[in-house]
Amino acid sequence: MYIDNIVEGFYNVVHDSRVLLFVNYDIDAICSARILQYLFRCDTISYTLVPISGIQELRLAYEENCEEVKYVVLVNCGGTIDIVELLEPNEDVVFFLIDSHRPTDLCNVFSSSQVRIIGKPEAEENIPEFDDVFREDSEDEEDKSDNSGGESDPEENRAAKRMRLSEEAILKRREHRLWTEKRDRFVFNYTQFSYFGKASAVRMFELALNLSKDNVDLLWCAIIGVTEQYLLGKIEKQQYILDTGVLQGHVSKLSHNVDEETAEAVATPVTAPRISFIKDLQLALYRHWTVEASLRHSMYSACKLKLWSLKGERKLHELLVDMGLPLAQSRQKFCAMDMVLRKEFHSMIEKLAEKYNLDQLVFTSFILQHGFRNKFCASDVVYSMLALLESTSRDRSSKDCFLEAMDALSRSKKNLLEDGIEKAKLMLTSIFKMVQGALDMQMVVSGGPFLYFVIQEGALNARHFSHPHTLILLAQFLLQAHVMVKKKSLNLPLIASAPLNVEDGTCLVVGIPPVIEDSPRNFFGKAFEQAAEKTNARAQLDYFDSSIMKLKTEDRSKFFDALAALLS
Amino acid sequence: MPLTLTQRCCHLLAPLIPFTVVFIHLSDDDGVRQVFEEMRGLYDQNVAAANDSTADPDGTAISSIAIRHAALERNKRCLMAYVFNRSKKLRNMRWQFGSILPPEIKANLCEPEIQWFNSYSKCLARYMKSIGGQGLNLAQDVKPPKSLYVEVRSLIDYGKFELDNGEVVLLKKHSTHLMSRAQCEPLIIQGVLEQINH
Amino acid sequence: MSLCQSYVPNYFSIQDILATQEKVPCKFEMQVKHLGFLDPGSDKRDIEIGTSIELPLWMASVLNSQRPSIAEVGLPKIFKEAYRDIMKADPCVVDLHKLAQYFYEFGMCLCMLKHRESSEISSVLVESFKQRFRQILDWAQHSTIEVPESKKLDETEKMIYHMGREVGSSLYLWLTEGGSLITAADMVIQHKKMKLTQKDLLH
């Protein structure tokens, strides 16, 4: 069921007991968890936080931690699956779902009280009516009607009764079959596309707002959550603009401190944290990198200028010259460039955006400033946290990375953020190199109704791509670039695959929708499921985002064949 | 007679020089025994020489007796210092590790030292119980507390931990918890949990 | 919980015991029977008058304090004229770790024997300590290395150095308000590190 009043339906309910928090491995979830942690800390609601990456891990973690716990909060996980069936909890355990994954599983939507979804169902979700999907009297009616022969009117003779009963039975069966077909159609339409709803971090910020505990740090977490959704292509630009508009309102409210009695503006200390609303450029990490590198490795500019080719390089140099930026300066770190050039960079590139086909270069975003030296813009923080989250190595398990990404949001741990920015530079560089290599060697192959791209096991930097987010970024970059090269593949989706674990022989497969549709609705979830069933491939649809899955490398080719057959 | 007098007891003391070895080293039972033998030898010689003073009219035996006596005193002093300093280290360990020592360290102790450690723990417990009528845990709140509940992160797979109100928390590596300070303080000091700084 | 280590002769102090173990040359004025083994050079049964043996200070003070005194105590090498002049010239460059590990303690014990050169010895001790102390203070406040092996300090100075570092870090903790974070006990952290290194070695 849905809970509209988040304070009464959720916060006051868990107020006096212990809470179990399960958090997914994505930035939005981490931001929401931080807001929740802050609120719980204020009100000393004791909690246990466990990071989980997949459905199996959720089940395991629940089994281990469920003793004596009555309230379980799932952040960005579990919305799209039937929780009660998966976890088999006790009757009195209540689950609160804060999930931006859509479509929400119908069993969760129509659960009477055990599963409570925080928020309102949005209009475009098109949730079918309860009666269309669930029916109490499904199979029993048939049996009952067959056995109710003993109660009939004793005057009817046997033959007539049998005829009447069998007619009723046939009618009932026919009605049941029609209803089942309709139900299947509803369910198919509902679950066909997977997409994302409102960011969980924003919902948590609203909770804080209603409790009057909102402050700049929590607002920053919400901003990061929304920015992550935009940068990873989870929401459309329109939605992003709407969301940032709302957040901007909060920003101006929080930064305008008026003393109530005297109605004068209270001077905040210069070093207090404050957020400003700015027009930012879609150049990744340009404040911490060289201008040339940033132009080259950002998806938008690289694709529009075709920077993987020689012609593109020349265009890049032209652009720099037009801006009045000497090549030597553009190869220096941004903060080491001349003051004049730095100040004018933004305005110059805006002016030239149209000429070079970069009209969408400017977008609205936020900057956090605290102290005199610390200035971070939201997209920088998102890239940094992504890089930290996916920088597993021999010494750092994925859970270590999760905790580090979570710590990177706190203001006192600036060095983590800077470390993450360095890692993000490496990540973006390897993505660009992979795209360049793929396009040069024409490795993006058409598999019929879709394109696919496979990173072989021994390839350079293959281990960078054994994480879902990096692979998704690569896939998006690759598809955009490919479309610039071959215009006719505008309406083809892309499936990318990278080796996951060389010893186990598994690989990671992600699917992204075609470029022509602006909306990020992804039909690969259902497609993967059906193809895996058909070919009996050893696949694990373990991730909460259904467009990502694990597969045994040997089964990959027949899986793709089945997928091609399914989608054509 | 060894050429070197009282050198053995200096070997006993070498590892106890402050700041050289952090933990207690293996108890040198052999060394102690050798020192005892040396002392016995010296004593016997002294007794023999003293009884023999009739054979030595000009009193030159006094000097050798004096030297041997000084050596005996010296050995005694070294042994006492050895025992004393080891006990001091053990006492320090009681406050750092709690009343149960890790097995690697316990393997380095000799039997009397283990008994001493246990009786020290008992004395300490008895004293702490007697403070103020209802007892006071001196090992708690070593640093002044700032809040009633603290956020901690588990560093190892500790397993289930029961709180005072009966709830059970599973302390698995990488999980984060908000718990009351009093209950998780001993775990933090033991190194199982880590407090998070914001 | 800690007794002061050894500025006062302390029965249990390890530093005091080891300092008094340092050798001084003793010239025997009386014959000592049966203790010829103390002289590594000779193989006689007794010690003859006039032999000079290097004996530890505790034994030398016992020999000296007997009336009539059994042996006369000379000065060890480090306190002779030549080295005293070196120490007067520039104490900071002398490597006390190699020359005399218990320079100050030893010197103070020697002075207590009321030698005829005691006053010069005591003045050398005080002057060199004054000058070297400044360096130790600087190192303790600003160095990042734990063990000053390369710093040519004797044991007393090492102790001062370590105490300085401990005090400095506790002041820093107090000033940075980090005092409220509960931390694992120092020994526990070091114990863990030791276990990890042992595991690494085994693999």
Image (cartoon, coloured by chain):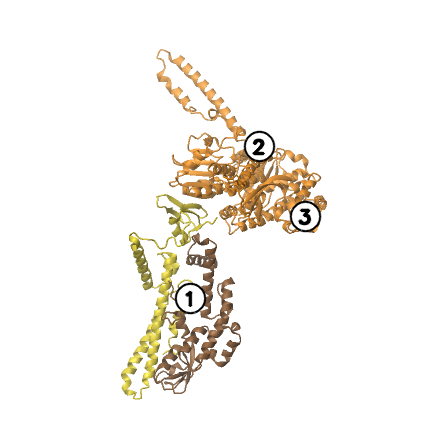
Chain colours: A orange, B yellow, C brown
- Looking at numbered disc 1 in the image, what kind of residue is underneath it? Pro
Q: Position of residue A537 (x, y in %)?
A: 53, 38
- Residue A49: quarter of image: top left
Write down the residue under mark 1.
Answer: B18
B103 and A439: which is toward the camera = B103
Q: Position of residue C11 (x, y in %)?
A: 36, 71
Dots 3 and 2: beta carbons under 8 Å? no
Label 3 vs label 2: CA separation?
A: 54 Å
Q: Is residue C188 left or right of residue A510?
A: left
Write down the residue under mark 2.
Answer: A566
Dots 3 and 1: beta carbons under 8 Å? no
Chain letter, disc 3 residue: A
Query: Which numbered marker is on residue C5?
Result: none
Task: Mark 3 vs mark 1: tell me if same chain.
Answer: no
Element carrying mark 3: helix
Task: Mark 3 vs mark 2: tell me if same chain.
Answer: yes
Label 3 vs label 1: CA separation?
A: 61 Å
Query: What is the crowding at mark 2: few (fewer than 14 residues within 10 Å), some, or many (at least 20)?
Result: some
- Looking at numbered disc 3 in the image, what kind of residue is underneath it? Leu
Chain letter, disc 2 residue: A
Label 1 vs label 2: CA separation?
A: 76 Å
Q: Is residue A162 above or below residue C195?
A: above
Q: Nearer the viewer, mark 1 or mark 2?
A: 1
Q: Position of residue A399 (x, y in %)?
A: 49, 47
- Residue A47: quarter of image: top left
